[in-house]
Image (tube, rainbow, N blue to C red):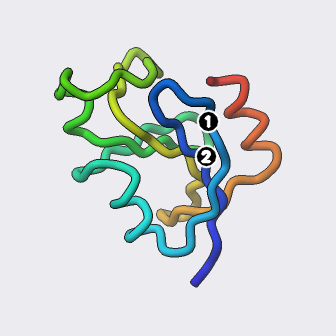
Amino acid sequence: MKNIKTIIVEPDKKPYIKIINNINYDLYGLVYYPYQKMKLSDNLYLIYSKDATLNKELKRNRTINNIEIYSTFIITGYDKNEITSLSVEQIEEIKKIL
């Protein structure tokens, strides 16, 4: 298994880095299914629950690109249709976005 460095963003908490070993298993434990991907920039994506944008009973997290996101989401690298680990440069870019 490959280690993937991601950023986790939970409501009312500061974003933090987390190493994920199994993206399918760990993603399911963090973000409600079904997932939605939002492109933030080249090779940088935000993964959030599609249903969490509709369910106002969940805790509001952030508004990004005019989309209100509820509940936890992750930010990760993405290259050639595959989730990849974040680089130092991408982490700095994310700090500016959040």
Q: Quadrant of residue 29?
A: bottom left
Name the residue type under label 2: Ile
Farthest residue, direction right: 88
> x%, y% of residue 97?
64, 24
Which residue is at the front of the view, 47 or 42? 47
| Rendered residue at 51%/66% (across/down) | 82
In the picture, measured across the screen, residue 75 lies left or right of residue 69, that is right
Specify which label sits upstream in the sequence, 2 or 1.
2
Q: Quadrant of residue 78?
A: bottom right
Residue 53: which disc?
none
In the picture, measured across the screen, residue 34 lies left or right of residue 6, that is left
> x%, y% of residue 34?
22, 51
> x%, y% of residue 89?
81, 43
Say few, some or many: other residues with alpha carbon within 10 Å of mark 1 (under 14 / 14 to 19 / 20 or more). some
In the picture, measured across the screen, residue 59 lies left or right of residue 34, that is right
Q: Secondary structure at mark 2?
A: strand
- State whether residue 14 is above or below residue 83: above
Farthest residue, direction front: 12
Which residue is at the front of the view, 44 or 62? 62
Q: CA distance from mark 2 to mark 1?
A: 6 Å
Residue picked out by circle 2: 7
In the picture, measured across the screen, residue 67 lies left or right of residue 45, that is left
Name the residue type under label 1: Pro
Q: Quadrant of residue 16?
A: top right
Residue picked out by circle 1: 15
- State whether residue 71 is above or below residue 25: above
| Rendered residue at 25%/28% (across/down) | 58
| Rendered residue at 35%/20% (across/down) | 68
